[in-house]
Amino acid sequence: MHEYPVTVRIVEIASETAEKNRGRVRRIDLVVGEDSGFIGESIQMYFDAVAEGTPCEGATLVIEGVRPKLRCEICGKLFERKRYSFQCPHCGGDGEPTGIGKEFYVKSVELEIEDEFVKTEETVS
């Protein structure tokens, strides 16, 4: 249930961007790490309801998932942990946690901006 207030904030961020640029949100790219504490599917589920009546209404929410990775303390290589194991598949060393997989941020907001019609006068010779 903690995805609801986060979804509200995502819509607020995108709406503020759209309003500053006098446009509408067409697409939001969101990065959600598996270890971030948030579930992308839940955010997706709330998105349409939260976006209703905002510049985000009708926009597409694209969620990029990031799998957690460990760094081997011996060879330094990154790897995805196998279930019940912290062993590096490259050298057999122990893996240490990294920040990879804890990401949670709005990567980009794609806007549709209405064309402004500016009247200009030209002198033709």
Image (cartoon, helix red, strand yellow):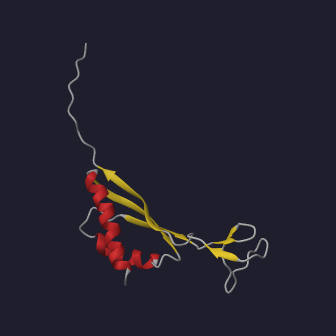
Indicate left or right for 34 with 97 as reference: left
Front one among 83 and 18: 83
| Residue 21, position as x, y percentages in the image | 28, 50
Q: Is residue 12 above or below residue 17?
A: below
Q: Is residue 57 visible?
A: no
| Residue 17, position as x, y percentages in the image | 31, 56
Q: Quadrant of the N terminus?
A: bottom left
Residue at image location 77% in from the left, 71% down from the top: 90
In which quarter of the view is residue 52 placed? Answer: bottom left
Front one among 125 and 102: 102
Q: Quadrant of the C terminus?
A: top left
> In this view, which residue lies farthest toward the bottom?
84
Q: Is residue 9 visible?
A: yes
Indicate left or right for 56 with 92 as reference: left
> In this view, which residue lies farthest toward the right?
91
| Residue 4, position as x, y percentages in the image | 34, 78
Residue at image location 20% in from the left, 25% down from the top: 121
In which quarter of the view is residue 117 placed? Answer: top left
Q: Is residue 27 above or below residue 80?
A: above
| Residue 110, position as x, y percentages in the image | 39, 56
Q: How many marks?
A: 0
> In this view, which residue lies farthest toward the top?
125
Indicate left or right for 55 with 109 as reference: left
Residue at image location 27% in from the left, 61% down from the top: 55
